[in-house]
Structures are given as C-alpha cells and as structure tokens.
Amino acid sequence: MRTDDFWAVIGRATADRPGRPAEVAERAVAELAARDPQEIVAWARHLDKVMAASATEDLWAAAYLINGGCSDDGFDHFRGWLIAHGRDAVAQAVRAPDSLAELPAVRAAVDTGAVFEAEEVLVVAARAYERATGTGLPPSPPPGRPDPDQLWDFDNEDEMRRRLPRLSALFLEPPE
C-alpha cells in the first residue's frame, strides 16, 4: 500500500461530509474490513508512519494549548483527531502547528471548551483486521512521540507565545 492509498481511505471516509472522527473511523473500518488482511496491516503501518512524522514537540504544545492540557495518550488521541481531517490538515499542522489557529473548530473551542481527541481513528486497522479475520492485528511499535521528560515547559506562557503566537492569542490570557 502506498501513502496515497492510505490517505485515500481517509478521504473516502470523509467524502460528502466531514463527519465526526468516530464516523470517519467507522467508515474507514468498513472499507478496510472488505480488503485482504495484508492490506489492512499495510494501512496500519502507514498510520504508524504518520504518527511518527507528527510526533513533534511544537505540535504537542499546540495540542496542550488547544485542549487545556495534554498527556502522552492525549497527544496520540489529538493526532487521531487531526488524521480524521485528512492529509492536508496533518501536513500543515506538522509544518506549522500554529496554523491550527485557523481551523474554525479550534477557534470555536475558545468559547466551547471542546477537546479534540479521536482514539477511534488510531484503532481503525485493528478493528478492520478483527472484523475481517476474527483475530487481532499483528503488533506494531507504540506510537512515536517525543520524550515527555525532554519537552520544553508547556506552562511557560512566554515560550508558548514565542513558539505558537496565534494559538496563544486565542487560548492564553493577555500578558500583564
């Protein structure tokens, strides 16, 4: 399976309507479950690559700011939410995490307090494989992420404003 094929599954799962991440995940599971099990495994390995490529410190900081805190599992789930928005959204957020301030849902979260997580997107392949074969997906390495002990201090508002100025303008109190 090529990278384009991986993203095509997500694209079809969001076709006709963006849908909630849970709906995107269910549509992707249904499509993958109809495929050869080896294709499902290949799709899972591409997901591993996307998780590794998106395991950046500043993206984690953006998730921390947007969600009002972000554990290591929370960062994985945030990236699941991001993946449900497609290839362009992931690529843009990895390139420039502060660009997430442009997303209408993120801007609305300032008032609604919405938290953006979609663990269900991260288990699409496992659910599809089980549906197709009746057995568990062969294991893969845990999702990539920076070492939490090596992160800069996400509670340092000055550093947050320096690295993520647009998100900080939305989610942090103005400096005194």
Image (cartoon, rainbow, N blue to C red):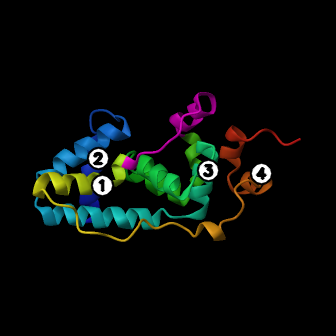
Discs 1, 2 touching: Cβ within 8 Å: yes
**For the magenta stretch, what is the residue range?**
103-119
**What amino acid is found at the position of numbered circle 4 in the picture?**
Glu
Magenta highlight on residue 94? no
Q: Nearer the viewer, mark 2 or mark 3?
A: 3
N-term mark: 2 or 3:
2
Percent across and percent down for residue 112 are 58, 28
Q: Position of residue 113 (x, y in %)?
A: 59, 33
> Nearer the observer, disc 4 or disc 1?
4
User: x and y percent of residue 61 in the render?
Assistant: 62, 55
Whichever of callouts 3 and 1 sits on the residue coming sooner in the sequence is: 1
Outermost residue, right direction?
A: 176
| Crowd tier of the residue under label 2, counting other residues whose Cα lies within 10 Å: few below 14, some 14–19, many 20 or above | some
Closer to us: 50 or 99: 50
Question: Mark 2 or mark 4: which comes first in sequence?
Answer: 2
Residue at position x 62%, y 48% from top? 69
**In the structure shown, which secondary structural element does the residue marked by tag 2 occupy?**
helix
Say which residue label 2 marks.
Answer: 11
Q: CA distance from mark 2 to mark 4?
A: 36 Å
